[in-house]
Amino acid sequence: MSLPSASYTAAVSGAGLGLRRSLLGSLEHTTPEDIQFLEVAPENWINLGGRLGKKIRSYTERFPFVCHGLSLSIGSPAPLNTELLRAIKTFMQVHGIRYYSEHLSYCSDDGQLYDLLPIPFTEEAVNYVADRILQAQDILGQRIALENSSYYCAPQQEMSESEFINAVIKKSDCALLLDVNNIYVNSVNHGYDPYEFLASLPGERTAYIHIAGHYHEAEDLRVDTHGTAVIDPVWNLLERTYSIFGVKPTLLERDFNIPPLAELMAELECIKRCQKQAVLP
């Protein structure tokens, strides 16, 4: 299926926030002026009825939404989960959700592994993953974005992480979900320059951006947790991203240790401030 180049964009703008069930109450009185878009993991909401079903509907009727999948497992040796993709397509249609992204990793084989594991950086894996992305895009009827994932080992590595990401995106004609925190985490754990890595990515294919906090395990080890505030080196990397690739929709991820709403809104204001500064003459 041929997809128009304009659909590299996620069709949202500004600063967004990952919607977690624990936030459903505290976000009730926010508006799209406060939060320009929201993101959900579709697996957590598909076929959900009752009180929670009505609650998510009340949000999708008020805010622009994107989906960020958790379990498609695009690099898995197991067959692609086409049933899940069809359920996601229906969920997106029902709620008017504008875009879908996933992780460039895998999390299943004979069963769910409940962790994101690295795909080998090999030519064979490029071809395998790209074919599965093309199949997913065909089922969904739209281009999807794949996120540069954090990883802690690189099995069977034949090419660099950047070469692998570029090759997969080019071969599948998909978009990039650019996670600046993952760049920083990987740069510490694998000893490379995050700014050089950033510049090597296909920024023109960026659908939107993720930013988050992480755990400082040791001087040479960071763990991607989404459980703390964003630190200055990651904010600096976001600013550089805008300066190289232009301002892109940017979403704050916070999965646990969720602070009071005022603290989340303060981080969203940091995103908005970076975006405004990037477009000043």
Image (tube, rainbow, N blue to C red):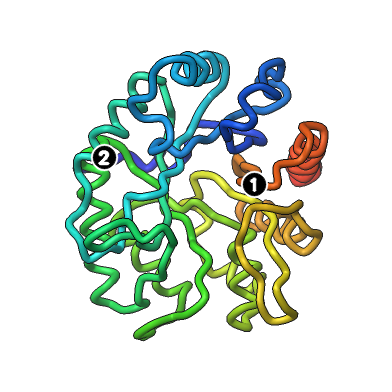
Figure check: 64 above or below 108: above
Q: Which disc number belongs to residue 256? A: 1
Horizontally, is 84 left or right of 254 in the view?
left
Residue 72 x, y percent position in the rendering: 32, 50
Q: Secondary structure at mark 1?
A: loop
Q: Nearer the viewer, residue 182 or 169?
A: 182
Figure check: 189 above or below 9: below
Q: Which disc number belongs to residue 196? A: none
Give me the residue at 33% from left, 25% from top.
47
Horizontally, is 226 left or right of 52 in the view?
right
Task: Tell me the quarter of the image containing the C terminus.
Answer: top right
Residue 182 x, y percent position in the rendering: 59, 63
Horizontally, is 142 left or right of 42 in the view?
left
Figure check: 54 above or below 26: above
The amino acid type of the residue labelled 1 equals Phe
Number of marks in the rendered image:
2
Based on the displayed image, in which of its 4 quarters is residue 14 positioned?
A: top right
Residue 53 x, y percent position in the rendering: 44, 19
Horizontally, is 80 left or right of 230 in the view?
left
Give me the residue at 27% from left, 60% from top.
130
Between marks 2 and 1 in the image, the one whose residue lies nearer the viewer = 1
Q: Which disc number belongs to residue 85? A: 2
Residue 128 x, y percent position in the rendering: 22, 66
The amino acid type of the residue labelled 2 equals Leu
Of the residues under marks 2 and 1, which one precedes in the sequence?
Answer: 2
